[in-house]
Image (cartoon, rainbow, N blue to C red):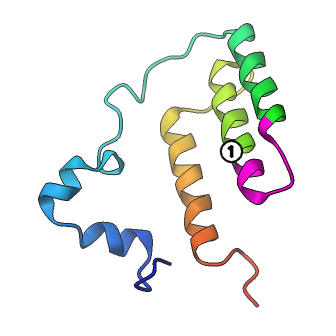
């Protein structure tokens, strides 16, 4: 929830048109269905960076998880897309914004 008590979807829907058009959130990348060729070097580099940034904070673990998911784009054994990664990250941020899965 936002400071105003709205979910991200409600907050997004209330944005003025001119702001909504400027928000990258409103428009998926036109090449989001692009093919990503397997690239072991790039995949391993992303995974190494993910391990380097992973720390004790939930934020660093989230960034590491995002980097790891992005590395899956270059793994021939994984089936994902930029859109799937975006939607997954958006869902995680919504849950975090609402106080997590286990609200007390």
* Element class at badge 1: helix
Query: As rendered, which of 95 and 19 lies closer to the eye?
Result: 19
Residue 28 visible somewhere in the drawing = yes
Q: Is residue 24 above or below residue 20?
A: above
Residue 99 location, quadrant = bottom right
Q: Is residue 56 above or below residue 98?
A: above
| Left or right of 1 in this view: 68 | right
The magenta segment is 53-62
Query: As rendered, which of 65 and 87 lies closer to the eye?
Result: 65
Query: As rendered, which of 95 and 77 lies closer to the eye?
Result: 95
- Asked if residue 56 lies in the magenta stretch, the reply is yes
Q: Which residue position is annotated with label 1?
A: 63
Q: Is residue 92 above or below residue 63?
A: below
Q: Is residue 25 above or below residue 91?
A: above
The x and y percentages for residue 88 are 59, 51
- Asked if residue 88 lies in the magenta stretch, the reply is no
Quadrant in the picture for the C terminus: bottom right
**Direction left: furthest residue:** 18
The x and y percentages for residue 76 are 70, 17
Residue 36 location, quadrant = top right
Looking at the image, which residue is at 58% across and 10% down?
37
| Left or right of 23 in this view: 8 | right
Looking at the image, which residue is at 36% across and 50% down?
25
The x and y percentages for residue 80 are 61, 33
Prevailing secondary structure class for the magenta stretch in the rendered image: helix
Looking at the image, which residue is at 63% across and 68% down?
96
| Left or right of 1 in this view: 95 | right
Looking at the image, which residue is at 76% across and 28% down?
49
The x and y percentages for residue 74 are 65, 18
| Left or right of 26 in this view: 56 | right
Residue 76 visible somewhere in the drawing = no
């Amino acid at each position: 929830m936002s400071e105003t008590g709205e979910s991200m979807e409600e907050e997004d829907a209330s944005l003025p048109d001119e702001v909504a058009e400027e928000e990258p959130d409103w428009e998926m990348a036109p090449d989001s269905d692009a093919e990503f060729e397997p690239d072991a070097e790039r995949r391993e580099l992303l995974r190494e960076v993910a391990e380097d940034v992973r720390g004790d904070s939930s934020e660093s673990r989230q960034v590491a998880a995002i980097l790891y998911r992005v590395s899956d784009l270059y793994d021939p054994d994984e089936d994902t897309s930029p859109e799937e990664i975006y939607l997954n990250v958006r869902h995680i941020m919504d849950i975090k914004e609402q106080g997590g899965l286990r609200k007390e």
